[in-house]
Amino acid sequence: MPQISILSPELCNKIAAGEVIERPASIVKELIENALDAGSTEITVEVGHGGKRMIRVTDNGTGMDREDALLCFRQHATSKIREYDDLFNIRTLGFRGEALPSIAAVSRMKIITGRKGAAGTAMELQGGELKETKDAPAAGTSVEVRDLFFNTPARRKFLKTESTELFHIIDAVTKEGLSNPETAFSLIVDNNETVSLAKAAGLRERIMQVYGEEFLAGLTETAAATEGLEMQAFVSTSSSFRNTRSHQFIFLNRRPIKDQSVSHAVYRAYEGILPPDKHPLYFLYLRLDPQKVDFNVHPTKREVRFEDKEAVYRFIVAHLRDAVKQERREYVREFSQPGADDREIDAQSFSAGMPAVSENLEFAYRPSLPYIYLGGTFIAVSGRGGLTVIDHHAAHERILFERLLNSGESSSRQLLFPRQVQVTGKEYGILIRNSELLKTLGFEIDEFGKNTILVRSVPAEIEDADIPGILPDIAAGLLDEHTAAKPLRHDLAARIACHSSVRGRKILSAEEVTRLLEDLDSTKHPDQCPHGRPTRIFYSLHDLDKLFKRK
Ligand SMILES: Nc1ncnc2c1ncn2[C@@H]1O[C@H](COP(=O)(O)OP(=O)(O)O)[C@@H](O)[C@H]1O
Ligand SMILES: [Mg+2]
């Protein structure tokens, strides 16, 4: 029950101060967290023009009486802590009494709030000054923020385009949604409902609402507890590794946080399972006794300080490892499937210190030449005065990459049944906006609404199986920085190629090996995959002589 008071100056000085309002998304985050602290079960976020013109967050929480309403936008006014010791037992998302005054100071704000069954209050502020107070019926709270930074033009200039600000807003709503399944969220963007999350039965259901069933199927769930520390986690199985660090979340006591040591722990748990340059998806929900963690280290509270960081680290590694152990076994089995060569060579030590890829290697491959598989990835072929070792995935990537760039639309294959793929709101927006560009790479997509994309055609070389994985990756590419050295279309083609060529650790037949080598030979840059890794390494007899110290 809010009972706001102003913190003493001594206590204020102990609080990690700093700018909490950077951009519209920070306002959305703060207002949602206030609504959650007020026990809301339904939160509606409306934004206009990327939040630059208007943000309104409406909740069905406790609301405030007149006295609290008149205090809430004052500096260091909070109902959440009173004294110094409270800082070490934070159970609410807010505690500094900074958000409302900071937002009010740089906008035109309207607050309508009231407790159920009591008279409510409507207030209008401008640049932090109260202009008007009226009676108004309300059960819950609605905070409207217009014309952000209208009185600080220097800060307004730092705002990005409406669509960029909108992505950050969608991100913020998604994160809060992912950590508060029992609350319903709705995000309305320029009068269109863009995110709609009904009250969910738990975290699993909430992740499903946001990302869809197929995505969830690629995650394994695990839970563990020890004294004062609990974890519920949803993490990648080997079928859902990604090329980027997308969809990696850590929540601590329902608060999205960033923490190097926790994310390191996750990667540690995947040691020996995660292929190079791949990243797991993870949703880590941690619950820690609030006395064992300090939330008061960063102005936006995104970073925390654990009392015993190492214990948390060890706990996460140990339990996630167990969860992915099953996965590890499957991985090993795949590698030694029949067809793979028994005399497996440790590829890493084999190539260490080897001569660099020969430039313009002229490789005349004849189908009759003998080849062997080394492990599941490398093919060794003898011929032309030496030995060539080919990374068949990298080679495939190079071939596909060039085909995508060259043929584009013409190589597009119409799907018999258009495929529906659910993505996040952020991904949805950027993909739809770039559908013309995607068409030039062989993807024909359409809006289906509710963050679902209808895929009508895909590049001919691609199997539809991985479409749910490719689309988010393309979206990530569209959001990335691009330069002359890394042009957008190349980046996207590389991402698509990467997905299609890693599918399965399939061992190629003799015929397929032949075709692969021929195709590779006919590419413009046969020696490197689109990411710059070698596709093939040639050891001439002369190189071999040197390696065996005969010369
Ligand atoms: N949506 C809301 N519902 C009920 N009370 C609210 C709401 N938003 C803010 N308040 C009250 O206003 C106070 C100040 O909010 P804020 O400036 O965000 O500081 P903090 O959340 O750190 O306490 C809160 O402590 C709370 O009592
Ligand atoms: Mg707050």
Image: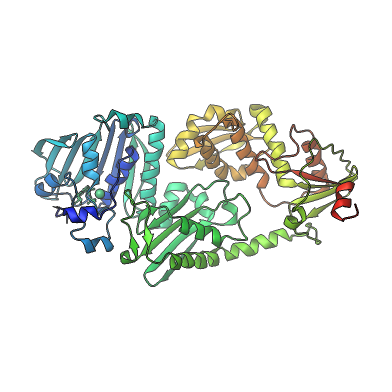
**Residue drawn at (28%, 63%) of the image:** 88
Quarter of the figure with residue 89: bottom left
Residue 350 coordinates in the image, percent (x, y): 77, 55
- Horizontally, is 463 left or right of 264 in the view? right
Name the one closer to the observer, 52 or 329: 52
Residue at 87%, 56% in the rendered image:
548
Q: Is residue 122 above or below residue 349?
A: above
Residue 290: image quadrant is bottom left
Place of residue 55 in the rendered image (x, y in percent of width and height, measured from the top left): 28, 36
One can see residue 39 in this view = no
Task: Please tell me how many numbered marks the rendered image carries.
Answer: 0
Quadrant location of the N terminus in the rendered image: bottom left
At 15% from the left edge and 49% from the top edge, which residue is drawn? 64
Front residue of this view, candidates 249 and 190: 249
Residue 57, how many percent across, how many down?
Answer: 26, 41
Q: Looking at the rendering, which quadrant does residue 195 occupy?
A: top left
